[in-house]
Amino acid sequence: MTEFSESGDSQASPQVATRAATPAPVRRWQGRKLLNRISKHGACAGCGRRVLDPDTGVIHARSSKGYAVTIGLVRCGRIWFCPECSAAIRRGRTEELKTAALRHLAAGGTLAVIVLTARHNHTTELDRLSDALWGAQMVGADGSPVRDRSGKARRVPGAYQTMLTDPAFYGRPEARNRWTRKDGSVGESIRPAEPGIRHSIGYIGMARASEVTRSQANGWHPHMNLLAFLGATVDGTPANGTLDPEGYFEPTEESLTEWEDWLRDLWARTLRKADPKFEPSTECGIPDCKCRGKGHGVMVQIVKSPDAAALIEYLTKVQDGKPPTDSVRGDLDAAGGAALETANASSKTGRGRKTMTPFQMLYRLWDLEVAELDPRQAEGYGTAAQCRAWWAEYETAMAGRRAIEWTRGLRRHLGLVGDDSEEQDLQYVYEQQKPDDLTGGVIMTPDAHATVVQADAEMDVKAVIEAECYESAADLVAGLGGRRNHVRIATAEELAEIQEALFARVIARREELERQARIAEYEADQAEQERAQLLARLNGDGDRPARTDRETGTSKH
């Protein structure tokens, strides 16, 4: 009888030759196809399958640079779950973060690349550890969500939110307390403002990117990559204050050490409070370990610009075509590397056969269930049933959480626009689909497109388009059981016209969603201010409003 290990590999079969690596775009397509079949989210089940405008159909065209594109399909925009959408979103988010990092370095600021993790093992439940890291929805005694006056669900903060709002880091604002004496006179006490660690290091905000892996030995491993912007002065809070353009400085080694020591202590203490099993190590005896003996819960790397003036000149005169100096090239590499490490988890894969990302679970399922490969040739580890169970657990734990998020006010300090919304994520996805000029292609009806999708023949259509054998597209659909007259060849001019019309609809939809989001945010702000003022009056602070989450710049995801 043939035996199978926990990894799903046959123990009796002879050694199987390693298969050739599949190109990344094809692999992402395979993962998305599996996602369509197993996801419990409707948007993911329909990503790349549903037609955006049935009257127009689906465009398969060749760009002027020779690659094939598909336009006219609904995309899910789920960064956690869809390999194709995630790659586009993380690429856009990485470019935004790289721009921010370069601007900050050019102005004289300092960057800190931070990795935050927690202790975990093969029995760790992903949803419980995720709640400890990023917070959880607050529920009442009956199990229903607790909501504020605006109807927005309230959340219990996780270790990340606690880190941003801890008084030792954030400081304490001036507080006034007034009371009326029996004789009618008014008494008043004032607690002076107390600076926090953020003031000494010049903290103005940070960007957070979260990711998850799973190892055969230690189970789920959710962790965070942060990029902190330091060495600047803000008049007021980082969320609502004003950046002083002349207030850049270099944080001292003492202040950075104090910050790192505080962060290690708070991180371990907060996770221990959530569950002692999650408390990370704070020391390490491994020789030459990159943690420098400080444990693996918190890792910090400081990035500075050796020549800010040269970087500014390069950024402002890059159109002149002059190559960057060595110091500027170093800045570009450092900023790009920091942004890529922070935001672009979709390009990462697990190490060998013993660790894998969630997307690699989808790829393994494709190898096992569709390609019917030997388990030892398939990517990752685990049986098909295990991969399906792990994926379902992952979807449940990560649904509703933001993968990439900036603290409030940071974009404004760096002269950037945009937000962390799902609408912005979708914009990155659809913008990537707007290619160079189209030289030719075909238009398929929804029925013809469905025929191709059901046969998993999208890559065959892609090959036909790239070879400019447009007339063969109809033959392909007919050979799959579809109708030949549901595919027609389109000229470059016709494709350009249809393309513009489709993207105009996408932009109009995005603008309407943004308008609705601004209204909802304004209403939430008003309700939050009313709540803060009510709490201030109850606490005897007169008309002085209490600090709200928006003022501290904390996240609720």
Image: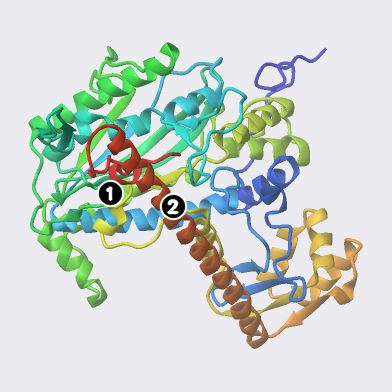
Residue on which disc 1 sits: 239
**Mark 1 and mark 2: span between their CA atoms?**
15 Å
Q: Is residue 248 visible?
A: yes
In-image side of 331 versus 164 (left or right)? left
Q: Are marks 1 and 2 in contact (CB under 8 Å)?
A: no
Q: Amino acid at mark 2?
A: Asp
**Disc 2 target residue:** 420
Q: Name the image colouring.
A: rainbow
- Rendered image quadrant of residue 454: bottom right
Is residue 354 in view from this perspective? no
Select label 1 or label 2 by which is in front: 1
**Quarter of image, res 430:** bottom right
Q: Is residue 425 above or below residue 205?
A: below
- Image spot of residue 523 (x, y percent): 45, 54
How far from the left and from the top, in percent, is residue 394?
60, 32
Name the residue located 8 percent from the left edge and 58 percent from the top edge: 246
Q: Residue furthest front?
A: 183
Residue 144 to residue 47: above or below: above
